[in-house]
Image (tube, helix red, strand yellow):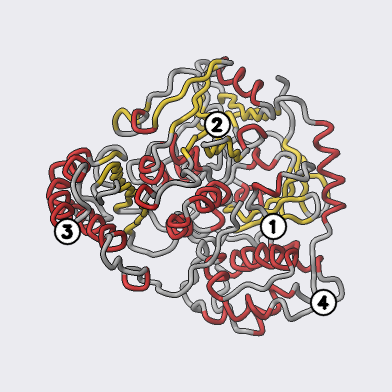
Amino acid sequence: MDPQPIRFVHRGQITEVSGLPVTTTVLQWLREHAHQCGTKEGCAEGDCGACTVVVAELVEDDGAQETSGAIAVGPLHLRPVNACIRYLPTLHGKALLTVEDLQSLAPGRALHPVQQTLVDCHGSQCGFCTPGFVMSLYASYERHQGAGTRPTRQQLADDLSGNLCRCTGYRPILDAGQAMFEAPPARLDPEPIAVLLRQIAERTPEPFVHAAHNPAYPDAQGQPRIDHFIAPRTLAEFASVRAERPEARLLAGATDIGLWTNKQFRDVGDLLYLGDVRELQAVEHDGALLRIGAAVPLEDAWAALVRHWPELREMALRFAGPPVRHAGTLGGNVANGSPIGDGAPVLLALDAVLLLQRGPVQRRLPLAAFYLDYMKNALQPGEFLRAIEVPLPAAHAPQAETLRLRAYKLSKRYDCDISAVSCGLALRLDAQGHVGHVRLAFGGMAAVVRRAAQAEAALLGQPWSEASVRAAMRSLDADFQPLTDLRASSAHRQRVARNLLWRFWLETRLDAPLPASQTRVWSGSMPALHTV
């Protein structure tokens, strides 16, 4: 595995980078090495969107768009991402578009329509966040121009939910998002980029390896340690490297690991990248199973879940803003094992099973058995998560046996915020209206995401009634003794968990269930995910 320079397309040409640490972020490279300072650093943790850029990837498979939430422009797939937590080596074989690129898409005009309408609509004051808004709006612009559609204000609000503005306010920015379609189109020409990306692909060995000194961590001889970034492109090669290097850190979207290095200055050592393995990026429907590969972006994974369970749409949208949803993966969210992760409660409620692999050997493990303790899981050395398998609802199940499913999230900010409590709640009733199947899974209530065993026992076999639910609510206090932290007190978390179970009953009771307009903050129409 001979080290190679990082090669990617930037400003219309192939750029080669060597010698930078493997955890150098795209934002650091742009500002400190390329001296392209339009992209800003706000939070350095993927939370504010000031650093939003667009990454374009060459996808020759015509059927790939069917299961992708990416923005298709010819043979390119575009995704908005946060440059502050995106490691530079992950750009190898891709193209980077920043705010400096947009004017060239509108020759003869001073600004691209996205930029011009922000000026015309007074969508910027201090201007610090504006480049990030521009790039998120540009991603929306390309999607809707390609589809021949126009976004509603609610759809634009979701497209911008990963971008924070601290002074202008969002009304003029949304005005600009609607007005940008009134000017003559200024689309990206994908072919010149595709030609360059094919040239990079022809020169890329299997696997791609980038190596660089890490001056922060000397080796045994006192010399700067050499760290490696390894990016296989096939599942067989990935499994082989994983078995040979079980100590290497697995990397997908870096939406969590990026904070380890930015905020905590942690040593992550060698990185083994999942993001270029096509088999791990597949969403498959296999009979009675939905199989989501470990490297499937959150945007695509949640869209696949929502297609089968529309009740999950609000959780999918609130999970994170688009730049995080397009970079992070559901597999990473599960494997990371954070007790406040939003994916695991939903998947536990759906009885998800994990497909694990070590070398050529595969095994299946229920998600309920995966978490052993705080940030500890059942993965063996050299093993990795290959896919998440979710049983699909029966096509012709009797009405009484229909799965009643809800997912709720409590956070201080409605969009793009970390949960204080999240939950996935599911049950089936028998013909007599008694609970025949129940799953109550909570995050933020214990050291790991887990089911509420005593509350489930209080409901199983009982009528789906107010008295049964009240008993289950009391049992939740025995199931969980949550901690107090900056997000919520222990007492608040317990109260919220009880109230969310009560809300679940109000929305799914047999007699006069409450409509969404009476239980949700936003009673208007929810924007549609790009379902697959």
Say few, some or many: other residues with alpha carbon within 10 Å of mark 1 (under 14 / 14 to 19 / 20 or more). Answer: some
Q: Position of residue 261 (x, y in %)?
A: 48, 40
- Helix, strand or loop at disc 3? helix
Q: Is residue 163 above or below residue 421?
A: below
Q: Distance from label 1 to label 2 (Cα)?
A: 25 Å
Amino acid at the residue labelled 1: Gln
Say few, some or many: other residues with alpha carbon within 10 Å of mark 4 (under 14 / 14 to 19 / 20 or more). Answer: few
Marked residue nearer the N-terminal end (3 or 2): 2
In the picture of the structure, the residue carrying the numbered disc 1 is 36
Q: Is residue 476 left or right of residue 399?
A: left
Q: Position of residue 96 (x, y in %)?
A: 71, 51
Q: Are marks 3 and 1 in contact (CB under 8 Å)?
A: no
Say few, some or many: other residues with alpha carbon within 10 Å of mark 2 (under 14 / 14 to 19 / 20 or more). Answer: few
Q: Which mark is residue 215?
A: 2
In the picture of the structure, the residue carrying the numbered disc 3 is 466
Q: Distance from label 4 to label 1 (Cα)?
A: 21 Å
